[in-house]
Amino acid sequence: MKNASDPQFDTVIVGGGQAGLALGYWLAKGHHNFVILDENARTGDSWRQRWDSLRLFTPAKYDGLPGAPFPGDPLAFPSKDELADYLEQYARRFSLPVIHGVRVDGVTQQGDCFLVSSGDRSWIANNVVVATGGYRLPKRPAFANQLDPGIVQLHSQEYKNPGQLQPGPVLVVGLGNSGAEIAVEASRTHTTLLAGKASGEIPVRHGRAAARFVLPVIRFAGLHVLTLNTPVGRKVAPAFKMMAAPLIRTRTKDLRDAKVELLPRIAGVKQGKPVLEEGRTLDVANVIWCTGYREDYSWLKLPDQNGDGIPTHKRGVVESVPGLYFLGQEFLFAAVSATLPGVGRDARYLARQITADRQLTAERRPALA
């Protein structure tokens, strides 16, 4: 039940990453009464917590949020810490109302409003925007817990650097961009094996030349061609959400040059050791699961959810639950919707939608104090 002492807002944004901040910028310009709830201790921590050597695939000229270009060399590829610091400075520059250390564990409808809860704290809002991105929980295969307890296991979310690994061979599971980059790094200090199948790779060498001549074309296609407004975009969207991205910076040639042994997929575990589809048993001391993440919206206690627990929405707007919105998901509108180049545009659209709906909202619900 909502309490008269609960803070009341026009809009509560759940998630203080780039999506939530970009939307906050546009809502602030429209003089909305809103708050951003971030589970991290500092803005940008979701990036700081990733592995030490991570760098963005997009050049700085495409990494800025609305109102603040990314500083420095426009053709450089920022580190994850540089992006984290940029996000923190962005929130400070525009005085965005971010509350840190809040992990939302429930969103329910309470009469004509929403009740957003986190432990014993709660907020009341006319609108709720889920800006947590598409994935929240690390995904491992069911047989991972059958591995010998003497094997060091890390998910890519937990991996920081090779110093976490014990002596002996390293098995990286998952041939996506994370798996490829981590495997090359691990190969400098450990015998490294990489299991999985790539979903292709970009046809040019990643770097400054690509940032100047090739990535602008890819960005244009991701923003304007592969969208839910085009026949080709609608055709590829379902498969795009399911498959891993093509290899970008580290390709199969780079893996072979680094002496990384490429293997087929892992099929299971035998006597505590990983086993390949072909039946070969691998004697390794470390396993790094680069197997992605799964969506978790179990904390949304709302109607009209599909089999994944996600309310059906159109470009982030849940028409069957007025006042509920999504932002930052994979292919929310375009192929780049979950990336820095795309999130700013989606945020502006959603802010306009929230503003346009405000009058209708006022007619449906009592004004908040």
Image (cartoon, rainbow, N blue to C red):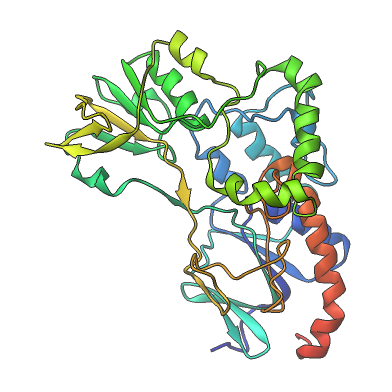
Number of marks present in the image shown: 0
In the displayed structure image, the side of residue 265 where residue 32 appears, left or right: right
Q: Nearer the viewer, residue 358 or 116?
A: 358
Q: Is residue 168 visible?
A: yes
- In the displayed structure, would residue 118 be above or below residue 204? below
Name the quadrant containing residue 204.
Answer: top right
Q: Nearer the viewer, residue 270 or 302?
A: 270
In the displayed structure image, the side of residue 259 where residue 22 appears, left or right: right
Residue visible at 80% across and 29% down in the picture: 217
Residue 154, percent across and down? 34, 37
Residue visible at 26% across and 43% down in the picture: 144
Residue 365, percent across and down? 75, 89
Residue 348, percent across and down? 82, 56
Residue visible at 59% across and 71% down in the picture: 311
Q: Nearer the viewer, residue 369 or 365?
A: 365
Quarter in which the C terminus is drawn:
bottom right
Residue 181, percent across and down? 49, 24
